[in-house]
Image (tube, rainbow, N blue to C red):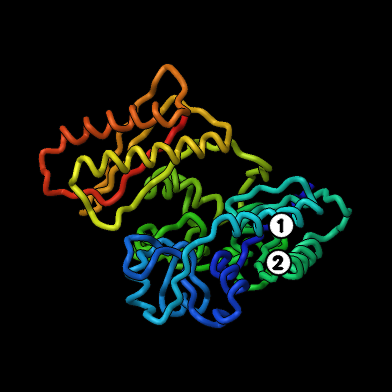
Amino acid sequence: MMKKIIHIDMDAFYASVEQRDHVEWRGKPVIVGGSPHSRGVVCAASYEARKFGVKSAMSCYQAYKLCPDGIFAPPRFPVYKQVSREIREIFLEYTDLVEPLSLDEAYLDVTENKKNIPHASTIAREIREKVESKTGLTCSAGVAQNKFLAKMASEKNKPNGLYVVLPNEALTFLSELKLGQFYGIGKKTYEKMNSLGWHCGKDLLPLKEEELIKLFGKMGRYFYQVVRGIDDRPVIPYREPKSVGVEYTFERDSIDYSFLITQIEAIALEVANRLANKNRKGKTITLKINYSDFLVRSKSLTLDYFLYLASDIFEQSSHLFTSVWKEELDRSKKIRLLGISISN
């Protein structure tokens, strides 16, 4: 039986929630993240802000330079999580096969759905209408025979759109798609493909799998498959988290050992809280250090017992930090970020 997959993507989710809850911000460039002059990053940007070039993961300072009249709003994650739960309830009216990718994005397998609706496009339309009616927010949807095609389809008519890729249209759809739009093809890979004279999906079709693997390593196999619309991944309703972690980016870079140890203690406490909330424990601890020149160091340790207490996490992470501190002879290199994660 041919699968019927829907990919739902909320439109500028965090920023749209802020515009919904602040009427005076509607139609204006809203940037969710830190303050304009902070070391924070942009979590989300409204479509009005995106016109100025503001993007997620960009530094707030850079966003401010691009859009000085933008409204910088601090993130309200408890609110976003509650709205996400409301949206998830709508999905579950149709199928239990819902795979959340984040608070604002999910795959749904509606091949056999609770309402026995024959067409996935009908379900997608109903979901979009219900989401807007219940939350006041819009979303985009893609419908196709597998996850990759559904993902690509949902990008076609953003924002607030719906696009359906029928099985007999998949190759044509992908052939005409710019390679930079393919999920999994990053900026550097796209530039390399362009230098080889490849610009659209159809340019990869004549190539053999071995050729692509030689050029791009294991990703070559992925490129060979997706340009042909091949994706047999199932929709997985729940995934075990591989790790639980917390990172702090400092307002000012620092080489003050006492200050940095204090920050590690605070991060360890937050990691312990997150582990408790998720009822998780782990045997491997990883310390991440970002320097002012953006060099990244990480150091891991695997123990024969489980970590979950803040005191134990702090003890082990501070030991890791001290060992790195002793190894680094250049004390002029300030630290801009510290992070701790627990896995295994």
- Of 153 and 258, nearer the camera is 258
Relative to 65, residue 208 above or below: above
Is residue 200 something one can see in this rendering?
yes
* Residue drawn at 23 percent across, 54 percent down: 253
* Residue drawn at 46 percent across, 32 percent down: 343
> Could you give the CA–CA distance between mark 2 and mark 1, rounded to whole angstroms?
8 Å
Relative placement, left or right, of 180 versus 238 is left
Callout 2 environment at 10 Å: few (<14), some (14 to 19), or many (20+)?
A: some
Callout 1 environment at 10 Å: few (<14), some (14 to 19), or many (20+)?
A: some
* Residue drawn at 36 percent across, 34 percent down: 286
Relative to 279, residue 94 above or below: below
User: Where residue 24 sits in the image (x, y, percent)?
Assistant: 56, 81
Confirm or deny contact between disc 2 and disc 1 (CB under 8 A).
Answer: yes
* Residue drawn at 60 percent across, 55 percent down: 103
Question: Could you say whether the residue bearing mark 2 is in a helix, strand or loop?
Answer: helix
Mark 1 sits on what residue? 86
- The type of residue carrying mark 2 is Thr
Give the quarter of the image for residue 326.
Answer: top left
Q: Which mark is residue 135?
A: 2
Is residue 145 something one can see in this rendering?
no
User: Where residue 9 sits in the image (x, y, percent)?
Assistant: 62, 62
User: Where residue 138 sits in the image (x, y, percent)?
Assistant: 66, 70
Relative placement, left or right, of 129 versus 287 is right
Q: Which mark is residue 160?
A: none
Q: Residue furthest top?
A: 304
- The type of residue carrying mark 1 is Glu
Relative placement, left or right, of 207 versus 318 is right
Count how many numbered circles sit on residues in the image: 2
